[in-house]
Amino acid sequence: MHHTAIALALALSAGASAQAGTLPPIVTLTDGGILLEFEVGQPLGAAAQPAGVAVCGGKQPPESAGRRATRGQVPTGLRLTKFCTGSVDHLFEHLFYLRTSAEPSEVVWPEPNSVSANGNTATFTWQQFQTRSFDAELSVTVTDTSGGAGTAGTASFTFTTFAPFRAADGVAMLHGFPYFDLCLDDGCEAMSAELIAPNNEIRISTGLADTEIVIRQSGNASYAVAEWRDVLDRLQDGLADTFANTGLPYGPGDFTGAFEIAFPAPAVTRNAEGATSAISWEIAISNATVPVELMQFQVD
């Protein structure tokens, strides 16, 4: 069991934007019956919100069995803490870690310098990403693929790095680590997972609820899947990680997992803007819980 941190926050209204110093503590994206919610600039060491039977987009959900407290490496940062179909939250947290080829370990994404949001889209931006020689941008879009019913949806993420006008720092490659901590049933401990496309597409499901999530990483990726909190500990242990496609098939159990993808750092030149580099991934959910009535017919 764990204790849920109680926090009050204001949602960023549709069409709003904020610069450094005025960042909203909560950014909410909605499309039809699908909702995403980001925490911005809040301590990553605090307890993440529990998933399960929660009223999404409103009050803090009730405590559920199991957990959750993370061990953040920075005082504040950015993380996704809700991915909802209808009134049910299926996510503890989604974090993104990064390591450059000149660094000894991964670091979690920091608090952005600015954010803009409009309905179902948001863009988070960083200048000199954690004091490195590139700027960065995360764009997010949520789409209700069930026609507004909230029974299926997709959250799409693109992380782009830019090389502004400054001297190079010797970084040739970046290693991105999208990390996923999901909950598909009230206990969060009966999930199974399988690889459906090597090595960048994983399906997570549970026998206790009619819910399925597929996470897809673009490009050539490696993965690590394990019981919570093994993968998170690896990303936070101060050592460089190289994933080796371990842990699948998985379950049933308390699923967590992450991808690793290496991509070129944007070229930095002294005379012109450098190129951009980007990686993309998505979380697709199907939660077909619409009740179906059995009609009975009688012939006299």
Image: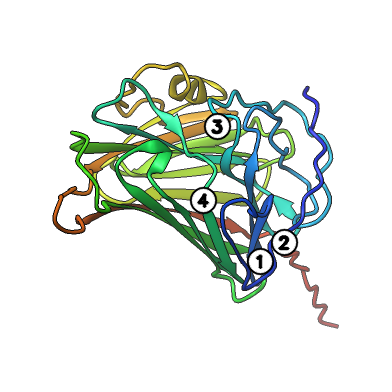
Q: Which residue is mark 1?
A: 150
Which one is nearer the viewer's eye here, 136 or 181?
136
**Percent from the top left, x then y, of residue 84?**
67, 55
Report helix, strand or loop for mark 4.
loop
Residue type marked 1: Gly
Q: Return the mark for residue 224.
A: none
First in sequence, mark 2 or 3: give its number: 2
Q: Residues within 10 Å of mark 2 (few under 14, many from 20)?
A: many
Q: Return the mark for residue 86.
A: 2
First in sequence, mark 4 or 3: give its number: 4
Which one is nearer the viewer's eye here, 105 or 235?
105
Tell me whether circle 1 and circle 3 mark residues in contact (CB < 8 Å): no
**Percent from the top left, x then y, of residue 255?**
55, 32
Q: Which residue is mark 4?
A: 113
Report helix, strand or loop for mark 2.
loop
Q: Residue at x 40, y 43 (%)?
A: 129
**Res. 86 image quadrant:** bottom right
